[in-house]
Image (cartoon, coloured by chain):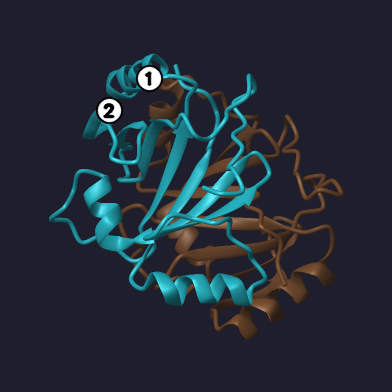
Chain colours: A brown, B cyan
Amino acid sequence: MTPQRVSLITLGTADLNRAREFYAALGWRPVDSPPGVVFYKMDGMGLGLFGLDDLARDQGRPDSVLGTGAMTLAQNFPDRQAVDAAWQAAMQAGATALKRPEEAPWGGYSGYWADPDGHVWEIAHNPFWPIDNAGRITIPDEA
Amino acid sequence: MTPQRVSLITLGTADLNRAREFYAALGWRPVDSPPGVVFYKMDGMGLGLFGLDDLARDQGRPDSVLGTGAMTLAQNFPDRQAVDAAWQAAMQAGATALKRPEEAPWGGYSGYWADPDGHVWEIAHNPFWPIDNAGRITIPDEA
């Protein structure tokens, strides 16, 4: 069983700077983000901009061309065991395995699966992004 | 200027029943939803399942074939004037107009625009879904 939660929405972008400038023109202010990614705080969740190729690679689909509107829904969990449990639940529900949960280069633990229509979910433990008992995450001001 | 908020994530589905059964197998419980759509309550926001063709039509792209992973991000507002203001902000930021805000068949007021990478945002006023001063929506138990 998995929680009814989305913790992070990730938009794959062909040009990260162009995307950042577009959201800046909309009035969005990112947190101080690592190179190659731009994070925005939302109430209890976040939105991220990421390169299309980087997103395909992160999803375990390095040779895929993600379609227009490529997007990922993420659920964060308080520890790795909970990520593994969510992976098992997804596999039992008939999800398509994209990347079994593994240690991620950014210091967390992450896997990817797709639903029957190809919508991609990431399940992750991020030790740097606090998550409360209600499952609400807080993106630090310096992400 | 627009708020840093996502109120509803809509997944376009090739087979609504198959999608609903998949999320049921994941443990997700929808609210009592109108025909042709399935809504799930999340904390201060919601996720919806919708037909791919219905979603294309709703986006003002009836002849489009939405790609795998077709998905919409929605921002809700307390009134129509705020929707119109958000539309102007998006146009000024360089968004692609898909559907200028108009009265929607479900009783609200809704428009659609796309960002430079084709990610589709809906901006909407829904008189049936309360929105608080912080912009958090509540999906009624009977949606």
Q: Is residue B38 above or below residue B2?
A: below
Q: Is residue A117 visible?
A: no
- Closer to the camera, A113 or B109? B109
Dot placed on the residue nearer the N-terminal end, 1 or 2: 1
- Closer to the camera, B83 or A129? B83
Q: Is residue A135 visible?
A: yes
| 3D distance between C-alphas at marks 1 and 2 | 9 Å
Which quadrant would residue B95 be assigned to in this image? top left
The answer to the question of whether label 1 and label 2 lie on touching residues, with beta carbons closer than 8 A, is yes
Q: The disc labelled 1 sits on which kind of residue?
A: Arg
| Figure quadrant of the C terminus of chain A | top right
Q: The disc labelled 2 sits on which kind of residue?
A: Pro
The residue indicated by pointer 2 is B101
Residue A66, percent from left and from top: 36, 62
Residue B10, percent from left and from top: 44, 52
The residue indicated by pointer 1 is B80
Q: Is residue B2 above or below residue A57?
A: above
Neighbourhood count class around disc 2 (C-alpha, 10 Å): few under 14, some 14–19, many 20 upward:
many
User: For the point 76% across and 57% down, which residue is it?
Assistant: A107
Residue B90, percent from left and from top: 33, 24
User: Taking B118 as reference, is A94 left or right?
Assistant: right
User: For the point 44% across and 32% down, which residue is it?
Assistant: B126
Q: In this view, does B122 lie above or below B32?
A: above
Q: What SS does tag 1 mark?
A: helix
